[in-house]
Image: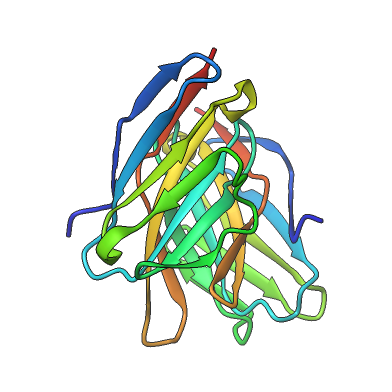
Amino acid sequence: EAGVAQSPRYKIIEKRQSVAFWCNPISGHATLYWYQQILGQGPKLLIQFQNNGVVDDSQLPKDRFSAERLKGVDSTLKIQPAKLEDSAVYLCASSFRTSGDQETQYFGPGTRLLVL
Amino acid sequence: QQQVKQSPQSLIVQKGGISIINCAYENTAFDYFPWYQQFPGKGPALLIAIRPDVSEKKEGRFTISFNKSAKQFSLHIMDSQPGDSATYFCAAYNFNKFYFGSGTKLNVKP
């Protein structure tokens, strides 16, 4: 079974530039998550999709961050304009509900963003 | 407010020793508690998970102990190996949302 795919793996940009990340979840996984992981911290949820609908985007800085999941499959996360504090690893994850009625979550390798 | 508190922040264990990482939570509605292992440059990977109706779950050298009344759960790594050196995250889940601890960096000395 193929895992969660993310690209690019690394990105260096200057502040005020824009950047976009792409995620392709595991086939059949209805739920897709974007997390921000700052060095030395746990993943922080930015946005969660159920199919192509947004379930939770309460912690997404909507003045600069946007995300979409067209057709309920792959997803893009965009930052425009980027700030220095956006330097982090952006993790995409997807999940499915097991027969025990719990979500099993799988993470991609992440995109490491450095904003200069 | 941090939903899941994890300790210690870092841990050094000799090869063959027992590594213990602790997590505590407040929300009694959480109904699923996974642990993730993350190597540098990789995404977190599910290691082992438990539901609150079970007090202990063991998979190989990894064991979760769960204390529902104390709202605490812990990961025990028996016979720790240098290959176990990684960052470990606990998490709690309810209502379609995962809440992560801050992580524990484990270093197993040969």
| Colouring scheme, one of rainbow, by chain, secondary structure, one colour | rainbow
Q: Residue at x 71, y 56 (%)?
A: B22
Q: Is residue B16 visible?
A: no
Q: Which residue is drawn at 36% across and 87% down?
A: A99
Q: Quadrant of the C terminus of chain A?
A: top right
Examine the rendered structure and indicate whether residue A33 appears above or below residue B16: below
Furthest residue in direction left, as rendered: A1
Q: Nearer the viewer, residue A30 or B90?
A: A30
User: Does residue B72 appear left or right of residue A3 in this picture?
Assistant: right
Please tell me how many numbered marks the rendered image carries: 0
Examine the rendered structure and indicate whether residue B107 appears above or below residue A96: above
Q: Where is residue A12 in the image (x, y as percent from the top left)?
A: 42, 17
Q: Residue A72 lies in what quarter of the image? A: bottom left
Q: Can residue B5 be seen in this view?
A: yes
Q: Residue at x 57, y 79 (%)?
A: B51
User: Does residue B102 appear left or right of residue A30 in this picture?
Assistant: right
Examine the rendered structure and indicate whether residue A71 appears above or below residue A21: below
Q: Which of B90 and B97 is in front in this view?
A: B97
Q: Which residue is drawn at 39% across and 38% down?
A: A110
Q: Where is residue B35 in the image (x, y as percent from the top left)?
A: 54, 59
Q: In which quarter of the image is the N terminus of chain A?
A: bottom left
Furthest residue in direction front, as rendered: A63
Examine the rendered structure and indicate whether residue B35 appears above or below residue A14: below
Q: Nearer the viewer, residue A102 or A12?
A: A12
Q: Where is residue B13 in the image (x, y as percent from the top left)?
A: 62, 36
